[in-house]
Image (spheres, rainbow, N blue to C red):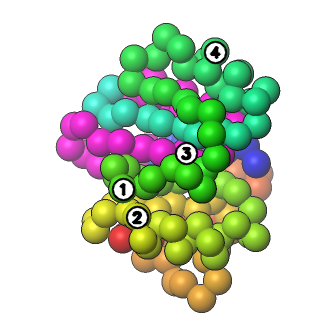
Amino acid sequence: YLSNETTGQALEELLPKQPSFNFLDLGSGPGGLVTYLAKRNSFGTFHGVESAPALFLISWLRLRKTFNANVRYGNLWRENLESYDVVYAFLSPAAMPELWRKAKKEMRRGSLFVSNSFAVPGEKPARTLRLKDARRTRLMIWKM
């Protein structure tokens, strides 16, 4: 799943206002969202993790000259979420229960977990943003 510019704009509003924050896109694909946010927010560091070799390479090429962004080739399930202020996922409904358990276990108090379009079964988000795009995107936000 690819995140669009409207989603990037909405996420930009959720970013911490203090300098030196860390944002993670789990399954960052070709790096469009990480690139978009990094170019517009010099105070944060933007990270992506991608397991598909071709998408990782595209993302790495896009980000190689961006001072505040990077992408790692790897398995999102092995990524420790502890150091991130905002963790974003646009994965699949099947991944959400396990990802929620991981987020609850690893993310710090006060950090944000944001899911694009797919709910966590049985967990009510603190806030839901309904975007005005062609997909009618919903961003579900949980404050840890």
Q: Which mark is on residue 61?
A: 4
Determine the CA span between mark 2 and mark 1: 5 Å
Q: Quadrant of residue 92?
A: bottom right
Q: Which residue is mark 1?
A: 82
Extent of the magenta region: 12-41
Q: Residue at x 38, y 63 (%)?
A: 107
Q: Quadrant of residue 120?
A: bottom right
Q: Which residue is mark 3?
A: 25
Q: Earlier in the sequence, mark 4 or mark 2?
A: 4
- Where residue 91 sits in the image (x, y, percent)? 70, 57
> Left or right: 18 with respect to 14?
left
Residue type of the residue flagged with mark 3: Asp
Q: In this view of the protein, which residue sits in the foreground, 15 or 95?
A: 95
Q: Which mark is on residue 106?
A: 2
- Where residue 58 sits in the image (x, y, percent)? 71, 22
> Left or right: 67 with respect to 61?
left
Residue type of the residue flagged with mark 4: Leu
Determine the CA span between mark 2 and mark 3: 15 Å
Q: Residue at x 76, y 70 (%)?
A: 94
